[in-house]
Amino acid sequence: MAPAAGRLAKTGRALCVGVDGGAGKWAGFDGAGGGAHADAHTFAALAMERGFAEPVVLVGEDATRAAVSARLAEIAALSQPGDFFLLTFSGHGGRTRVRVANGEVRDASTWQLYDG
């Protein structure tokens, strides 16, 4: 039986991250309004509606660098060829300079997770 329209034939996995405030640069910002948290939950609900496995939602103080890295590794280990992965981030970000393989320095966009 073919999947219903808009549903996945393979396994879909999602990691939805939302950070309204945090430590470091954003210390003291309490995230009043919770827009990024709401975004993460909205994206997770949309993934579920479209047949994804239970999404992983990391918001606020749970959205640390270690937690996001660990969940990415877990999802990668579970995934098979042909699966679909949805990664969403809502929150603040920044720019930094990074050296790429050929030694050139370029600007790169960053996410501001709870702990930096």
Image (cartoon, rainbow, N blue to C red):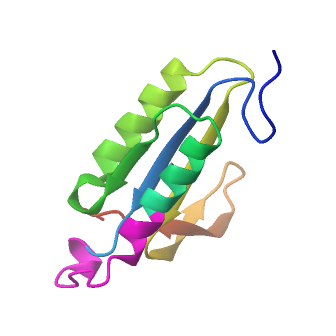
Q: Is residue 31 above or below residue 52?
A: below
x, y percentage for residue 77? 50, 20
Q: Nearer the viewer, residue 18 or 76?
A: 18
> Looking at the figure, which quarter contains the N terminus?
top right
- At a point 35% along the width and 63% down the height, the residue shown is 113
x, y percentage for residue 54? 46, 35
Q: In this rendering, does residue 112 appear at all? A: no
Side of 80 relative to 111 (left or right): right
- At a point 27% along the width and 80% down the height, the residue shown is 31
x, y percentage for residue 47? 58, 46
Check residue 102 for magenta coloring: no
> Looking at the figure, which quarter contains the C terminus?
bottom left
Pick out the residue farthest to the left: 28
Q: Is residue 102 above or below residue 52?
A: below
- At a point 46% along the width and 37% down the height, the residue shown is 72
Q: Nearer the viewer, residue 19 or 115?
A: 19
Q: Nearer the viewer, residue 17 or 65?
A: 17
Side of 64 relative to 74 (left or right): left
**Residue range of the region highlighted in magenta in the rendering:** 22-39
x, y percentage for residue 26? 27, 80
Residue 11 found in image quarter: top right
Q: In this rendering, does residue 20 appear at all? A: yes
Q: How many marks?
A: 0
Side of 83 relative to 95 (left or right): right
- At a point 47% along the width and 52% down the height, the residue shown is 16
Q: Is residue 1 above or below residue 40?
A: above
Side of 59 relative to 94 (left or right): left
Q: Is residue 54 above or below residue 39?
A: above
